[in-house]
Image (cartoon, rainbow, N blue to C red):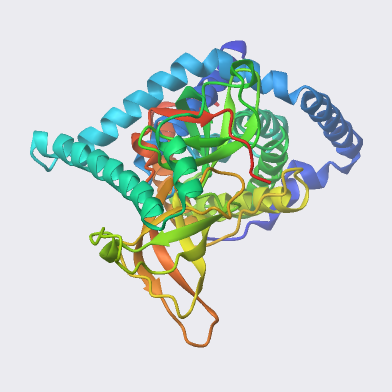
Amino acid sequence: MWKKSIITILLFCFFALLQDSFITHFSFFGAVPSLVFALFFTLAFFVKESNIYQIITLAIIAGFFLDIFSFTYIGPSIISLIIIGILLKYIQSALTTRDESYPFSYFLPLFIGFILLNELFIGLYIHFLDINKLILSFDIKIIYYALYSSIFATLFFYIYKRNLKNFR
Amino acid sequence: MTLNYRAMKNFSIHNKNRKWPKYLAVAVMLLVVLFILNIFVAPVRNAFYTISKPIQGALWTAGNFSAGLLGGAFKYGSLEKENENLKQENQKLLSQIATLQSIEQGNQAQSDVSLACQNSDFQYVMAGVVGLDKDIISISKGSANGIAEGMPVINQQNILVGKVFKVYKNFSDIMLVSNKNSVINVKIQQQNVITDTSASATLPAEIDGVLKGDGGLTAHLDLVPINSNINPYDVLVTSSLEKSFPKDLLVGKILQKTKNDQEPFQKAQISLFFDVKTADNLFVITNYKNPK
């Protein structure tokens, strides 16, 4: 249990550093993918629906690292990811198939939808509540951002599914 | 996709309503923890950045190197290096043109300040770039090195990068000129009139405009009077109207103008001179005083 938690924290930390300092050199039309969100979503996607506390724990870890490398207060990403995690499990409980519990055909559209929702939450927070009163308007770049991030999410999905099923 | 209503009913949030006080307690506890954490947000963030600085610095350098390697994969090895040198040379020349044009206009005071700027009378703090998030970059120096909020930031070719947005003890956040919240007064230097340097030459009136960040490391020029003649490759420098930055710092060049007779102003797409991807070190001007 402890080993798993430490690995998860280290993984999120490393991906946050990678996203902030390395991947930023490989922008696609100005968009940089969110590795942390992609990892959070992949792990949350495979969490059992009844295990709501695991979702919250993942959201706190991922949200903390997203917020610490951002200019906002610590909290908006954590709250946003908790909401997203719970919504994801709610939708997953409604969408099931007989042969496979976690199909990719559900994963990708859900990922794109939720990453856009996360940006909306954070954008609204920064615009209305953050002390810096910054503007994060939505334009075509956000689509590039979602698509670029989905490449990494797809990669994480298959890595998890093939190698790390016992990790959850 | 099929809707499985039985599964929905089994979902823990719905069928265990008696657990809601537990969830509420968790939510309240989380909010309290976040509140306490935010009281100490500056030292927490500073400590985190201080610990991660060596890794971030290494990752930034590795990213820079890898991007250069991949970018030049389809080119001849030396071509990219040569291109970079030419780019730097060009930026230096553009910087000199900015100064020369001020002299040509006979404004001695303006040129004095411009020359002071170009000749490094300002005091600088050099800092390494360690991260980038939403057109805000993090640098490895902070209040302990004399950096304060609002200070202008340039690179080694006197190209405007942005201004200090937030300062912590050992690092700072810089809002780039491409940030959506960045609005800068600029003047447009027309390239086709620079060649004639004789004193009797008629120089065009200075064209003012406003550079607005678009996010994603891009920006556009706005509020240029409709009757002003601007052209592709015209160079933008910071204007004397701009209070946050020294004037005549290079900003970018016009790519394409958008003129609509229905509107009182014209706009233009801009190519910014500052390339964050190739930036390793930046310079914070620590003694710039806003002109009153």
Q: Residue at x 57, y 60 (%)?
A: A138
- Of the pair B125 and B130, the residue shown nearer to us: B125
Q: Residue at x 47, y 63 (%)?
A: B221
Q: Is residue B7 in view? A: no
Q: Residue at x 29, y 41 (%)?
A: B92
Q: Residue furthest bottom?
A: B262
The answer to whether B242 is drawn above or below residue B285 in the figure is below
Q: Residue furthest left?
A: B76
Residue B97 position, x and y percent, is: 31, 50
Q: Toward which corner of the image does residue B96 lie, by quadrant?
A: top left
The answer to whether B287 is drawn above or below residue B249 in the figure is above
Q: Toward which corner of the image does residue B66 lie, by quadrant?
A: top left
Residue A150 position, x and y percent, is: 44, 47
Residue B116 position, x and y percent, is: 46, 36
Residue B123 shown left or right of residue B67 in the figure: right
Q: Toward which corner of the image does residue A86 lie, by quadrant?
A: top right
Q: Residue at x 27, y 28 (%)?
A: B65
Q: Is residue B91 in view? A: yes
Residue B53 position, x and y percent, is: 50, 17
